[in-house]
Amino acid sequence: MSVCIPTYMLASGLIAGGMSWWQAIGTILLGNLIVLVPMLLNAHAGTKYGIPFPVLVRASFGVRGANLPAILRALVACGWFGIQAWIGGQAIYSMLKIMWPGAANLQWVCFLGFWALNMAVIWRGIETIKFLEGIGAPFMLAVGILLLLWITRKAGGFGPVLRAPSKFQTTAEFLAFFVPSLTGMVGFWATVALNIPDFTRYATSQRAQMLGQAIGLPTAMTLYSFIGVAVTSASAVLFGEPIWDPVALLGKFNQPVIACIALVALLTATLNTNVAANVVSPSNDFSNLNPRLISFRTGGLITGVLGLAMMPWRLLNDFSSYIFGWLVGYSGLLGPIAGVMIADYFLIRHRQLDVEDLYRRKGAYEYSNGINYRAVAALAAGIFVALLGLVVPSVRWLYNYAWFVGFFVSAVVYAGLMGQRSPVEVPR
């Protein structure tokens, strides 16, 4: 899931915003090391008890209240699904324009065609997703490295690319861009940091899931981000301006064979990432609303339709909309959920859950008619404070730190509210 075009666009967006190559890579590495911590913590319960995210979150929000964080997480995944479908459609459109110049008016046809391909994969089920996972990432990584070598040779080697200086003249200018960018890097994986139990429930041990994530996430993200950084820097050398969108960049080269191979790789990786990262979780979340009526397949179809409704072409309008609007904005919704979950599992319950009661009404996690209003209050407090900077300019810094602010506010409020309960009330 790390080897995908949104990863590339993270790094290229930072370059387009004015960072040097090492500043961009350092920001991405730091963001991934930070988000690895809540990811490992939330993953623990999935491995220990074999439960997915919508079930784990019942412990803190209640057997009915869990639908609130699950749907917030699912809506963000729908937005990501739309973004990936738009990227894939643009790749098809770019290929058509290279091979058939008369295809200038088929942009929306290509987008909807790729969206329909995603829907077909979802309908075929999880085995198709597993197959795509096995071939997509290695193919995309190999083509990314080839693209890197090819474009840097065109730009005169790595020297001109890596010598490009930062555009920030002062530390204050850099920090004004760095802080929300770092939040965006954390926000990039804030979704999977919540629903990681959907995957780690199949892990053989805690050691296995911890090593797999610790080795896989920062390394793969940093490596593929470097490709995005170097290629975008090379585009600035070749074309006089940094081109952050790889599809737009490939469209500038008049070598159909190279461009088409690269775009086929882009399509494969985009389809691979979309169904794995942006369908599995929301399908579980929507199914959790009414398991008798909404199956995994139906949940996937709902994800696809909502992905269209969220207008991904606007989210990818430019690097600023992508990083500071989309990534930072939704991190203010998901950080508070992570704060409540981690505080509940580690501070309140000391990693002890009654799994049977997680699937039962009137059990230990019934709270008040199935809803833990303390968790809802903590979530609301975290979201309010994290997004306050959007409407009150004097505290804009709260929004720049949206994930961090939301996480800590919700965790503290939740621990404080739950601390008022007697030990008998807290299931062990």
Image: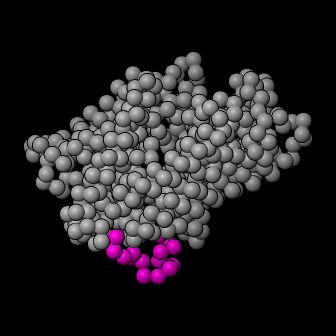
Q: Nearer the viewer, residue 183 or 1?
A: 1
Image coordinates for residue 220, horizontal then vertical, percent = 45, 50
- Number of numbered discs overlaid on the protein picture: 0
**Scheme of colours in the image:** one colour
Would you say residue 83 sits in the magenta stretch? Answer: no
User: Does the rendering let one see residue 358?
Assistant: yes
Q: Is residue 251 left or right of residue 133?
A: left
At 68% from the left and 37% from the top, the residue drawn is 45
Q: Is residue 165 magenta?
A: yes
The quadrant the N terminus occupies is top left
Quadrant in which residue 66 is drawn: top right
> In the picture, which quadrant includes the C terminus?
top right
Q: Quadrant of residue 207?
A: top right
Q: Is residue 90 visible?
A: no
- 271 relative to 171 in the view: left or right: left
Vertical placement of 27 versus 41: above or below? below
Q: Does 390 sit above or below residue 38?
A: below
Q: Residue at x 16, y 55 (%)?
A: 253
Q: Residue at x 65, y 35 (%)?
A: 205
Q: Classify residue 161 as left or right of residue 216.
A: left
> Measured from the top left, where is residue 232 in percent x and y?
31, 62
Image position of 392 (left or right of 261): right
Of 3 and 291, the residue lying toward us: 3
Question: Which image quadrant for residue 43?
Answer: top right
Q: Which residue, as the protein is rendered here, is positioned at the far bottom?
A: 170
Please report the residue visible at 53 percent of the width from the left and 67 percent of the height from the top: 179
Please tell me whether residue 261 is drawn above or below residue 200 in the rendered image: below
Residue 277: percent from left, percent from top: 47, 39
Q: Which residues are magenta?
A: 162-177
Relative image position of residue 296 (x, y in whole percent) = 50, 24
